[in-house]
Image (cartoon, grey):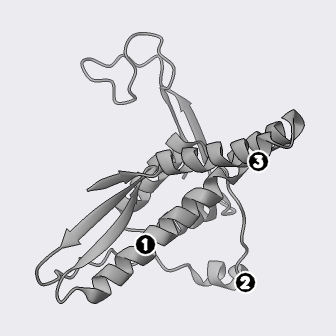
Amino acid sequence: MRMDITPYIDSLRRDLVAAAEAAGPETRQAAERLTFALDPAARLALMEAVSQAAAEITAEMPAGGVDVRLNGRELDFVVQAGAPVPPTPPAPPTPPSAEEAEEEGGTARITLRLPESVKARAEEFAARSGHSLNTWLVNVVRSATRDNAINVDIDLSSIPFLGNDPFGGKGPGRAGRRMSGWV
């Protein structure tokens, strides 16, 4: 089962703007700007509430459980009615080398703003590698910041592809035929 929380966020946005409208046009405009800034926090709060509800439902079930999974901007619910099947554990992350572990020390927290499409692709790659998005991003940044890292940026637009273009181009001269990253 899939749940899109966007209508709930939009409803919250409309209610806040309507409440601010009574104070005048300047307050309404400020409220509109604020609602867009609060969108990620509101989504996270809703996801946490739904996850907590799923955990409470699971605790009350005699067997099975309810899992909530993030799929892009939507929540997926997986209900196991019978005996729970233990999930296959993902492959353990590659442990950092002695040099990396030595230089890491503490943990720093940052805020990273990504276009929604980039975040969705990053989540797909993380899931394919059996890692959380955070672990996957740490590994990508770690690879990019190694002393011997090589930044590769190749323009593949001059290579003719017969049939399916692996880069999603729909014809000659289409943009998006680049390969970049760190080796």
* Inter-mark Cα distance, 1 to 3: 26 Å
Marker disc for residue 39: none
Quarter of the figure with residue 87: bottom left
Give whichever of 177, 135 is nearer the camera.
135
Give whichever of 63, 169 is nearer the camera.
63
* Inter-mark Cα distance, 2 to 3: 33 Å
- Residue appearing at x 56%, y 80% in the figure: 97
Q: Which residue position holds label 3?
A: 34
Rendered view: 14 above or below 175: below
- Whether residue 139 is visible to the viewer of this picture, yes or no, is no
Q: Which residue position holds label 2?
A: 106
Mark 1 surroundings within 10 Å by alpha-carbon count, few (fewer than 14), some (14 through 19), many (20 or more): some
Q: What residue occupies the far left of the structure in this picture?
A: 82
Q: What residue occupies the far front of the structure in this picture?
A: 22
Q: Tell me the SS state at disc 2.
A: loop
Mark 2 surroundings within 10 Å by alpha-carbon count, few (fewer than 14), some (14 through 19), many (20 or more): few
- Residue appearing at x 59%, y 61% in the figure: 143
Rendered view: 127 above or below 17: below
Indicate the quadrant containing the N terminus: top left, top right, bottom left or bottom right: bottom left
In this view, the mark in front (1 or 2): 1
Q: 75 left or right of 28?
A: left
Q: Which residue position holds label 1?
A: 51
Q: Please tell me how many numbered marks the rendered image carries.
A: 3
Kind of residue at badge 1 = Ser
* Labels 1 & 3 near each other (Cβ < 8 A): no
